[in-house]
Image: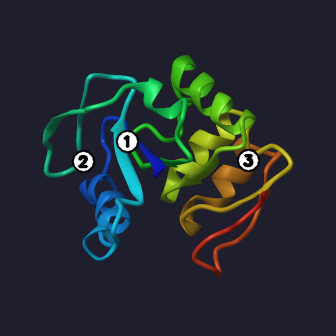
Amino acid sequence: MSVIAVLVADGVPGHQLTTPGMVFTAVTPVLPQVPYEVRICSSAESVTTGEPRLDLTTPWGLDALTDADTVLVTGHDAFREPPPPEVAAALRACAKRGCRMAAIGTETFTLAATGILDGRRATTAWPNLPELAALHPRVEIVPMGTPSVEDGP
């Protein structure tokens, strides 16, 4: 079974919180074995979503990232700010062991702030491209034109 860790923080848009679970569990009814375990995790015990504001308990902490095959970093209110040190360390540890990582929307800022994207290709929502380039000059910014940017094994 492949483990998908969805990293959330305060201000996560509701659809970014629920869509990964819907996508990765949609195939479950037609397969003999469950192919994915989706973990909603955070550095806090609970998060408040974006509008409409909902307070949610997160079932897993950052330790859920230690054996994840894929980490999805969702959007949140403070995406321009560097992540808390414990979040940055957990993400760097995932990258070091070769975990697949993806940022949803503006969360490219979070991955870039950890140094994970230095020397790599990345993109974000088009209105934020100049700011991403200015804040993280070591990241090769790719203008939106395709729905995703793949860089790595």
- Structural distance between the alpha carbons of marks 1 and 2: 8 Å
Q: Which residue is drawn at 86% across and 48% down?
A: 119
Q: Which residue is drawn at 37% across and 41% down?
A: 77
Which quarter of the picture shows residue 30?
Answer: bottom left
- Structural distance between the alpha carbons of marks 3 and 2: 26 Å
Q: Position of residue 27 (x, y in %)?
A: 34, 72
Choose the circle earlier in sequence order: 1 or 2: 2
Q: Horizontal placement of 47 versus 75: left or right? A: left
Q: Is residue 25 above or below residue 38?
A: below
Q: Do the residues labelled 3 and 2 touch (CB within 8 Å)?
A: no
Q: Which label lies toward us, 3 or 2?
A: 2
Q: Is mark 1 on a helix, strand or loop?
A: loop
The residue labelled by disc 1 is: 77
Quadrant showing the C terminus = bottom right
Between residue 135 and residue 62, name the one nearer to us.
62
Q: Is mark 3 on a helix, strand or loop?
A: helix
